Amino acid sequence: MRYKLASRKEKTENTIITVEDSSVGGKQLAVIAGPCAVEDRDLFIKTAVQLKKLGVQMLRGGAFKPRTSPYAFQGLAEEGLKILAEAKRTTGLPVVTEVMDTRDVELVAGYADVIQIGSRNMQNFVLLKEVGRGNRPVLLKRGLAATIEEWLMAAEYIMAEGNKNIILCERGIRTFETHTRNTLDISAIPAVQHLSHLPVIVDPSHAAGKWGMVAPLAKAAVAAGADGLIIEVHPCPDKALSDGGQSLTMSNFSELMSQLVPVAAAVGRKCNYEGKKLVRQNII
Ligand code: PEP
Ligand code: MN
C-alpha cells in the first residue's frame, strides 16, 4: 500500500472537516468564494460582506500568488493576510489562503483558517510535511499533471506528520485540449470518494479559465457528488490583478448560487442561498 491514512480501507466513514461554524464533507454543500488575490482592503471587505449575504461558508483570497510570470502581481503578502483577518472579523466567515514557502507557514497559519497548497506545490514534499506538523486544515489542490494516486499520496505526506484535516480540491488537469485553461476531471470526484474518506471539492474557475464556463462546471461537480466548490468572484473582473477572465461578478455568482439549490437538493445536499431578493433590491 502506497498510502494508508488517506485510504478508505483505513477509515470507512467519510471525514468531515470542521472549520469554525462551517464544515466540509457533510450534508451542507461547502461554497468557498472570493477573488483570486487580495488586492485592496476596501474592495475585499466589501466583497466579503456581499458574499456572506449570498450564503457562502468561507472566503478565499491569495496573499502569496504563484504567478507564471515573475513580473505579474505576486500578492500583498502579510498585508493581504491582515486584510483577510479583518474580513473574517467583519463577516464571521473563515478564510482560506495559499502558502507557497515553508518559511511562511507559521505566518500564514496565524491568519488562515484553512491553508491552501496550490496545484504547483502539490508535490513540494517539504512544504507538505511542514503543514502536516501543524493543525490547520489544509486545502490540497490536485497538481497540474498529477494522477489521482499521486494526489492521495500528497495527502498522505501531510497526514503522516499528524495533520489529518485535509480537503482535496480538483481544479482541472493538463490535457491536449487548449480551449479551456485545464480540463476538469469530473471522474476524479467519484474516484476519490471510492479510494479515500477525505472530502473533495471542485474549483471550476481554474479548470475553465473562462467565466462563462464556471456555472455549468460548478453544477456538474455538485451533481457528481462534490462536497463543495471554491469559486473566484471579483466585483470588477476587468480590473482584477489576476485571473479576471475566469472570475464571476457578484450577480453572476448570485445567479449560480440560486441554480445550485435544486442541483444540491437532487443529490441530497443543502445549499444556503437567500440572495435573489438582495439582487432584486440592488443590494448586491
Ligand atoms: C488559486 O487558487 O488562485 C490558484 C493559484 O490555484 P491553483 O493552484 O489551482 O492554480
Ligand atoms: Mn486564481
Image: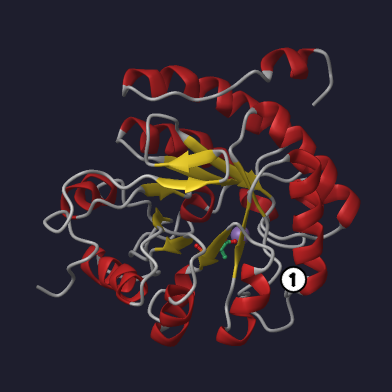
- Between 136 and 256, the one nearer to me in the picture: 136
Q: Quick one: SS at disc 1?
A: loop
Whole-percent x, y for residue 198 in the image = 30, 52
Ligand 1: which quarter? bottom right
**Left or right: where 43 falls relative to 237:** right
- Residue 68: tell me if it is visible: no
Where is residue 265? Give x, y as percent: 39, 18
Relative image position of residue 48 (x, y in whole percent): 75, 42
Q: Quadrant of the C terminus?
A: top right
**From what the image shows, is residue 278 above or below residue 250?**
above
Label 1: few (<14), some (14–19) or many (≥20) C-alpha neighbours in 10 Å: many
Disc 1 target residue? 75
Q: Residue furthest right?
A: 42
Q: In terms of image quadrants, where is residue 10?
A: bottom left
Of 131 and 68, the residue lying toward us: 131
Report how many numbered discs are placed on residues in the image. 1
Rendered image coloring scheme: secondary structure
Please indicate, yes or no, whether residue 45 appears anywhere in the rendered image.
yes
| Ligand 1 is within 8 Å of the C-beta of the residue at disc 1 | no
- Quadrant in the picture for residue 91: top right
Residue closer to the observer: 64 or 78: 78
The percent coordinates of residue 209 (x first, y second) are: 54, 54
Above or below 65: residue 31: above
Please name the amino acid that badge 1 sits on: Gly
Residue sitting at x 51%, y 21%? 259
**Residue at point 75%, 65% (across, down):** 81
Give the residue at x 68% y 76%. Answer: 107
Q: Quadrant of the N terminus?
A: bottom left
In the image: residue 82, left or right of residue 37 = right
Which residue is found at the position 64% from the left and 48% from the top?
Answer: 94
Q: Quadrant of residue 151?
A: bottom left
